[in-house]
Image (cartoon, rainbow, N blue to C red):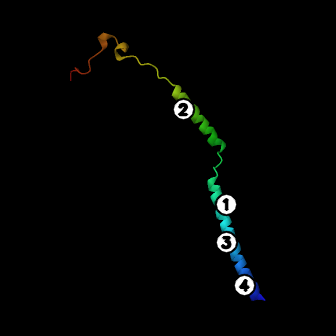
């Protein structure tokens, strides 16, 4: 009686473990295919970065004055002919 039980139980148990392993593998593959949900913090950070990038695209630097406009002509010195 014990041998008959073991001849039936061991193959049934092996088939069960194989089926479980195949099912588990299939579930892992399906999880890899699905996109991960974004956290609230990540969504907020992406929004802040896009706002910053838009502001930087609209930014216009101030016009610089030419060097000759900044100092009177009598104070300007020629850098190339400077005595050493």
Gap between marks 4 and 2 measured at Cα: 70 Å
Question: Image check: 50 left or right of 37?
Answer: left
Gap between marks 2 and 3 measured at Cα: 53 Å
Gap between marks 1 and 4 measured at Cα: 31 Å
Percent x, y of residue 34 = 64, 52
Who comes first in sequence, dot 4 or dot 3?
4
**Residue 83, relative to residue 30: is it above or below?**
above
Q: Residue at x 49, y 23 (%)?
A: 60
Who comes first in sequence, dot 3 or dot 1?
3
Q: Nearer the viewer, mark 4 or mark 2?
A: 4
Who is closer to the viewer here, 1 or 73? 1
Q: Which residue is mark 3?
A: 18
**Residue 81, relative to residue 72: is it above or below?**
below
Percent x, y of residue 75 = 31, 13
Who is closer to the viewer here, 73 or 48? 48
Gap between marks 1 and 2 measured at Cα: 40 Å
Per the image, label 4 sits on a secondary structure element best described as helix
Per the image, label 2 sits on a secondary structure element best described as helix
Percent x, y of residue 50 = 57, 34
Q: Residue at x 64, y 60 (%)?
A: 28
Q: Residue at x 28, y 16 (%)?
A: 77
Q: Which residue is mark 1?
A: 27
Per the image, label 3 sits on a secondary structure element best described as helix
Who comes first in sequence, dot 1 or dot 4?
4
Q: Which residue is mark 4?
A: 7
Residue 53 - label:
2
**Residue 64, relative to residue 40: is it above or below?**
above
């Amino acid at each position: 009686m014990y041998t008959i039980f073991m001849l039936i139980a061991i193959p049934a148990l092996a088939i069960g473990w194989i089926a479980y392993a195949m099912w588990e593998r299939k579930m892992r593959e399906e999880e890899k295919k699905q996109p991960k949900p974004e956290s609230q913090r990540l969504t907020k950070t992406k929004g802040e970065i896009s706002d910053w990038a838009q502001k930087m695209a609209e930014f216009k630097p101030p016009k610089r004055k030419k060097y000759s406009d900044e100092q009177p002509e009598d104070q300007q010195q020629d850098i190339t002919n400077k005595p050493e």
